[in-house]
Each structure stands twice: as structure tokens, then as C-alpha cells.
Amino acid sequence: MISIWEQETFYRKRDIIIIGAGFSGLWTAISIKEKSPEKSVLIIERNAVPLGASTRNAGFACFGSLTEIIADSQKMGWDKTLDIVKMRFEGLQKITRYFKNEEIDFELNGGYEILNNEESLQHIKQVNQKLKSITGLQDTYSLQQHKIKEFGLHKSQFLIENPCEGSLHSGKLVQKLLERCHELKIEFLFGTEVRHIDETSQQLNVGLSEELSIQANQLIHCTNAFSSPFLENENIIPARGQILLTEPIENLKLKGTFHYDEGFYYFRNVGNRVLLGGGRNQDFKTEETTTLETTEFLQCHLENFLQEVILPNQDFKIALRWSGIMAMGNEKTSIVKQVSDRQFCAVRLSGMGVALAPKIGEIVGEMIG
């Protein structure tokens, strides 16, 4: 049993409870409190620190590679594709307005995509024309062949550059968001799992154990790939992204963020080290999981990719290996909606949480009134 002191402080009734302290949960809480400072907001996070994808990603500040945008336009049509790209682009702009570059190690080194056939190049003019109203650039994507050698890349026929993209430190971004939350008097319960949710016409009971629950007027699910227990009817497919990071490499030529094979491989420099992730298209079924671990098969595959494409004829050692869990679906669109009288969700960010969450937070903030 809890004491009256706990009952009237940590476990008291709140206006809004948010489940999940990743990017979408934090930005949503900030948007709500900035709009309605009088509302009490509690974020419940089952881990000791935000996990999932927010602190386990590759630290890309990107809004879509050329081949991804072409593929999305063919699948979803241009209207939906441009809406998503605009939201990502504006999300990145918002991050740089809120935080100084040095606070989150933000570097606008450019985003690059390696292509090994000419097919996508035929669409580059059309894509640039479509994106002009979003980025303000005549050519968002351009061919930069001379940089292939400059970056020391192999097995790369064409290199496309996007000057609007860069990299950041995901951990530092989460820390800065947490600091902003504390300034706004947003409260937290870390290391606490939501077991069940009971909704009545009057309120919600958010159960943390058999004996303990917290009441709220509204609840927002921001647990992305881990939302299935509470959002059974939504199309949410977990997608694990495995990553490795090298030890420092002398005279490293690589600088910027890179995509390869329609974004299934992604790599960047972290100072003078190389971070490489992806390859789940080699083993889709195994990687449809919420288990945070790495597999020998994919880690070996990534090491081979590192050796053949990024660091040919160079010795390297692996310093770290980890994985993060993204949420995918039949479409790239996120699920941001009201799911019952008192519950809402902001999930399925399709591996673009860094860029999407700032804007999704605003949408949810408007939605709950």
C-alpha cells in the first residue's frame, strides 16, 4: 500500500498522462504545456532512460533520400509524400530553433545517397521541382561525383547530395528535451510500466500494479513499436535496426550522413569513427521484433559492408554494437489520432522519429484541446 504523501503527490490524478518518454512523448508533452501551462502532465516510462528508438538510433537529421521520395510518391501519391517530407523538414527546423547546435552536436554536413543505377536520376528534376516549396532550394538533390573519391567510397556509381541534412547526438537531444520538460513542470515516473488502462465516462484509471493506479482525464500513447498491447487494431510492425560503431580511424575521409540501397543501409561519421546501421532487408522476418539485441548474421553482414563500401583496404575495429526498435506499417504515414473518448496515440514514425516528433507533438497538442 502507498502512503497519503505518495497518494497526494507522485500518484495523484493528472489532466494528461503520456506513456513513453521518447521523442514523440517528450515533444507532445512540451507542446501541450506550452499551449496550456495550467494542465498537469505526467510521462510514464517503463525503462530507466528513454529507450526504443529515440536513444538507440543512428543520429540522422534527415527528411528523405531521393530514392525513398520517388518510391513513396509511386506508392502513396505526391500529396501524401510531400505532406510527410514537409513535416519532417519543419521538424528538423524546429529542433534547431529550440537548441543550439553545440548543445546537441548538430552538424549540417549534408546528406548523401549512393546509387548504383541511373533509373532514379531520371526523376531528380521532378523531385527537385516538387520539393522547392518545402526546402526553398532550386536543387535539393544534386549529383556530386567528385565526392565519391573524396569520401573514400567504393562500389558507388553515383553520389547524390542534399545540403539540408545533417547529424546530431540523439542522447544529448533527449537530455535537452528532458530539461525543457522540467522547466515546464512536466512530471515523470521512470522505471514504471503501465499494466492496464480502464476507461469510464468520467475518467481513466492507469494501472501500474494490482494495487496501484493513477487517474487521468486524458491519455496519449507514445510508445511507437511497443504500442501493440494497447493498440491491437492498428497496423504497427516492429522493425529492429542493428548498428555498429568503429574505434577511431586515422585520417577518416567520410563526413556526413549516407544512405545506400533505398535507405536500408545508413552510415555516418561520429567524429573520426564510422557508425553503420541497417541491412534488415537481408533478414526481414527476424528483424520484425521488439527484442533489443544484435544477431551474429547481421553484424557480420554489416562488417562486410563496412569493409567493401566504406573502408576498403583499411583496418578497423568495432567498439560498440547495439539495436533500436522502429515502427513500420503498410504506409509511411504516422498514426496520430483519437482512439477512444479519452485516449489518443502518436505512433508508427517509420524510422523518422527525430524529424517527425516535433511536429507530431504539435498535432496531438491541438487534438486534445
Image (tube, rainbow, N blue to C red):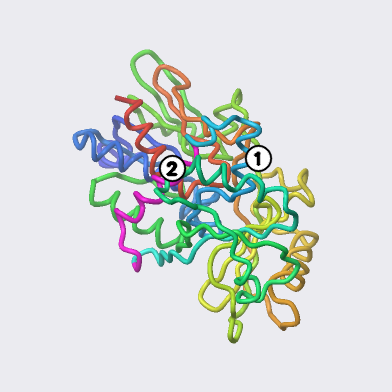
Residue at the (23%, 35%) spot, across then down: 35
Quadrant of image for the N terminus: top left
135 or 142, nearer to the observer: 142
Q: Residues within 10 Å of mark 2 (few under 14, many from 20)?
A: many
Q: Work out which residue is located at the far left of the displayed protein and give it.
A: 38
Q: Residues within 10 Å of mark 1 (few under 14, many from 20)?
A: some
Q: Work out which residue is located at the far bottom of the displayed protein and give it.
A: 250
Three-letter residue code for mark 2: Ser
Secondary structure beneath dot 1 equals: helix
Spatial CA span between label 2 and label 1: 25 Å
Q: Work out which residue is located at the far top of the displayed protein and give it.
A: 201
Main secondary structure found in the magenta portion: helix
Circle 1 residue: 71
Q: Quadrant of residue 348?
A: top right
106 or 237, nearer to the observer: 106
Q: Is residue 68 magenta?
A: no
Magenta span:
84-102
Three-letter residue code for mark 1: Ala
Circle 2 residue: 24
Quadrant of image for the C terminus: top left
84 or 321, nearer to the observer: 84
Residue at the (75%, 82%) spot, across then down: 313
